[in-house]
Image (cartoon, grey):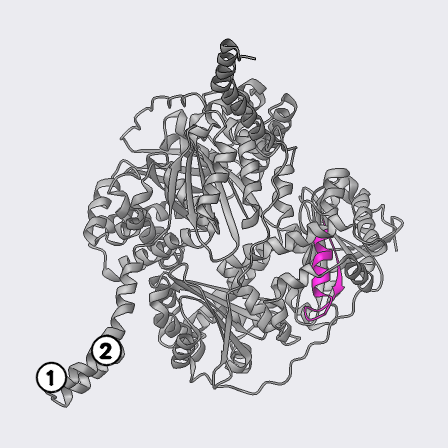
Amino acid sequence: MLFLKTLMAKISKKRLVFSRKILFLILPLLLLLTPPILKTQEKEKLSLPVKYFQLKNGLHVILSEDYSLPLVSVVVGYNVGSINEQPGKTGIAYLLENLMFQGSRNVSRMQHMSFINRIGGELSATTTPDKTLFYQRVPSNQLARVLWLESDRMRFLEISAFKVEQIKEVLIEEIKRRKANDPYRESSLTFDQLLYPDFTYSHPVIGNETDIRNLTVEDVRDFYSAYYTPNNAVLCVAGNIDTRKTEEEIRKYFETLPKGEDIPPMPPLKTPSQKGMVKSLENSLVSSPGFHLGYRIASPMSDDFYPLKIIEYILLHGEASRLYRRLFKREVIAIQLNGSIEKRKNIATLRIFVINSNQLLVERSQRAIFSEINRLKSRIIQEKEIRRSKNMFKMDYINHYATSLNKALFLTETFLSKQSLDDLPEELEKYLSVTPYDILRTSKKYFTQERILLNIKIR
Amino acid sequence: MKANPKNHNNLKTFFLFFLPLLVFASSLLSQERFRKSPPYPDPLAKLNLPEIESYTLSNGLSLSVIYQDNIPTISLKLVILTGESASPEALPGLATFTAYMLSRGASTLSSSEIEERIESIGGGFRTSINPDYSVFTFTFLEEHLDEALDILSKMILQPRFTRIEIANVKRFMTYDTLRKTSDPEFIAKRHLYRLLFKNHPYKKSTYNEDVIKNLGQKDLLAFFDKYYRPNNAILVLTGNLNLSTASRKVSSYLNTWERKNLNDSFIPPPEPYGEKKICFIDLPKAKDATIYIGNVVLAPTSPDFFPFLVLNQVLGGTPNSRLFMNLRESKEYAYLAFSEVEFFKSCGVFLIRAKVRPDVIRESVQECFKVLENITKRRIPSNELEQAKSYLIGNFPLKIEIREELLSKVSEIKAFNLGENHWSKYYENIMFTNSKKVFETAQRYPLLTSVVVIAGDKNVIIDHVMEFDEIDMYDIKGNLVQSFKKGVIK
């Protein structure tokens, strides 16, 4: 672009008449310079080749080809998490995540891990309030083996009293370890209950110790039969695959698995209180005071979610973000700051957590945060600042496409959140076209006095 | 003989109804039969490695480019071929300090302005230092290549080391070093390296937080001026750009970076430990016992490099390897037990790391040495060898799929002058490794005279630690407190 400007300046200096000859000279140059500009604009629309189909038993399948390297990622996502647990039975979804590695009818205990390790692959799993994901990244010639492993545990998981008891012990140990290692855990769980007054959303994914102790093998079997079924799952395969052959293999391993019963309906939700609240919690484990601050914001399915996501980046992402600068550089009043938008099914909240060295600085930090939020509500954000936040967001968004596993996880999570895969290529642009006015409007609408504040005091 | 029409009808009924049913049932049975055992894998797919194109600019800056257009971002690593081993004897930590200062001010830009400019192009900037080189990793949106190179060139060509930022970086380094001391693995490994690199320049990277206060602006300027030179640097880029674009752009921003002759900085390999030594570090409140066992082995340029990778894989590369299967699955001593090889320019260090129950420390160390002894005495069975090779071959594309790891691998190949073999012939080198080569390699290196460092809470494990014939006890800073023989102070 700079070259073109210089050339045009030279032409105008010499007062040349715009002849055909010059047009001939400039036109090819212009054409040469144009594609990168167009290309940059096109890149906002990320392309992701996707094939979707559903098996007779209800299993949703997503395939995405990428031939860069001979590897493939397989993700199986179940539409189940801690929000599907009943009172008194917490921790059962996380227990099942662990049990899924303990063997099924044709796969012995630890054989799943061992198979993946032997071929140089990687595997993991995660349980959140609203989903459970199992994933592996392996050399592409081993795809059939992964499908075999996943199909076996989808239908034939071996649930014995012995295994359940073993995992219960592991989970109880883990709860104890988390308690010992994180003195702020208790405050975080209390804050969950204030932010999500309904049991369904507020209890911890790992469960409560007493509930875990009381879980029976029948509870676990019932939960498995109800939710770990083809009709409550999505299978995503991304990487170096032959789509036709992969579809055949998926049909071979998964289509004969029987459809499960209809998924039990979600318990009715208590409408969150619209009133703000300030609470305090005294804790003898913490050595520094602090606080949790939360705002209930628009549902992830709403159009307001796009500007709210950019606000998250304005306030909390990067060393040049408003709160980082204010708390750590300008006023130097905080020891730790964490924050982000959290999504649990179709409820979203903006959560901020701060640790300070004394109570005086707790109050100063709160005033500083409220003042930054008020600035968002009262002044139009500068172009430079919104550009920084959007580009930071864009980089994070693009990273969903960086590896076969990132892609498979992104597609699975998008599908489980009931978002259409067809809309994905346009999604990034929706965030990038957020205007300073959108920021002002959504800040005013959602960052009201109806905020939830939990002060953590040293006992 | 006339055909019986009734029989004919029965036959017809059979063909019409029962035969399809039988076919269906048998197909179902055969469908279920495939579930009994794992399917055979397809033949290994061809790995088309991304090409590394290289060029050296007129000022000596070595440039390497790997074209990748899967995502619209660019990642680069600027490697200064000087690491912590080049810090003066009296000023350990100087190389680290200099590296951290690079992004803390340039030209008219303050550190906050640099942060803002980096984040405005969706970027992230990270610094890491090892004994041999200092690395600056910079990732940004591809449409901002010019802006990224402009920021980088300002940091290199017009650095600004203000007193305020010097104080900030020193505070950060002190806090960071102190923070790590709560990690038993960090403490045990640091102590092991202090013993293995005794009297060697690599020892300087094991400094304590107290030396940071000695670092000053004058030392910083001298170190920067001496080593931050294009003829002592490598720039590796990956993204949607080719060598010609990259060299044109890089050259336009960094062609005024002046070269300066450097003395040959050859570092000889440290001598391996010749006899087994056992040390204990008291870490109050540590729940488990952490064990590090290690010794100096081959340099990455050694012809034994690939057999040693296979050897390490058999010993402790994954949970299927000997150490994990033995110490955790069979004996139930350990929560984890793995091995690895960390390569430096002049040598490698073979390491075993394990977290074990405090009451079985001695047994755990004994088991580790049994595993090592076994591999030096018996050839690896073919199934175990193939399993290790299969892991290394299968895992290679997984590693280089991640841009950060790809750039690290290429930087290492360039910085250590490892040559083409380490990149384009990786598969072949692993495939052609046989049990004879691994056996000979195991015998060539002093695995059995490794140093053992145990970190744990003295109040919990002292009795178990005293079961060793001889043991040296150190404090967290690495000072020798007491030596014991058969449980009695020497």
In magenta segment, residue B399: no
Q: Residues within 10 Å of mark 1 (few under 14, many from 20)?
A: few
Camera-near label (1 vs 2) is: 2
Judging from the image, mark 1 belongs to the subunit labelled: A
| Amino acid type shown at disc 1 | Phe
Q: Is residue B310 magenta?
A: yes
Asked if badge 1 and badge 2 are on a common chain, one would say yes
**Which chain does tag 2 point to?**
A
Question: Is A295 in front, or is B19?
Answer: B19
Q: Residue at x 57, y 27 (%)?
A: A156
Q: Is residue A250 visible?
A: yes
Labels 1 and 2: the sequence-earlier one? 1
**Compared to A1, does A11 lie above or below?**
below
Q: Is residue B477 visible?
A: no
Residue ID at (35%, 48%): A364
In-image side of B192 versus A21 (left or right) = right
- Relative to B280, is B242 above or below? below
Which residue is identified by label 2? A28
Magenta part of the chain: B291-314
* Residue placed furthest toward the front: B1
Q: Nearer the viewer, residue A409 or A195?
A: A409
- Percent x, y of residue A134: 51, 38
Q: Position of residue B309 (x, y in %)?
A: 69, 59
**Rendered location of residue B296, percent (x, y):** 75, 64
Instruction: Give the residue pinned by disc 1.
Output: A18
Relative vertical location of residue B408 with respect to residue A154 in this rendering, above or below? below
Across and down, in percent, residue B442 comes to: 79, 60
Q: Amino acid at mark 2?
A: Pro
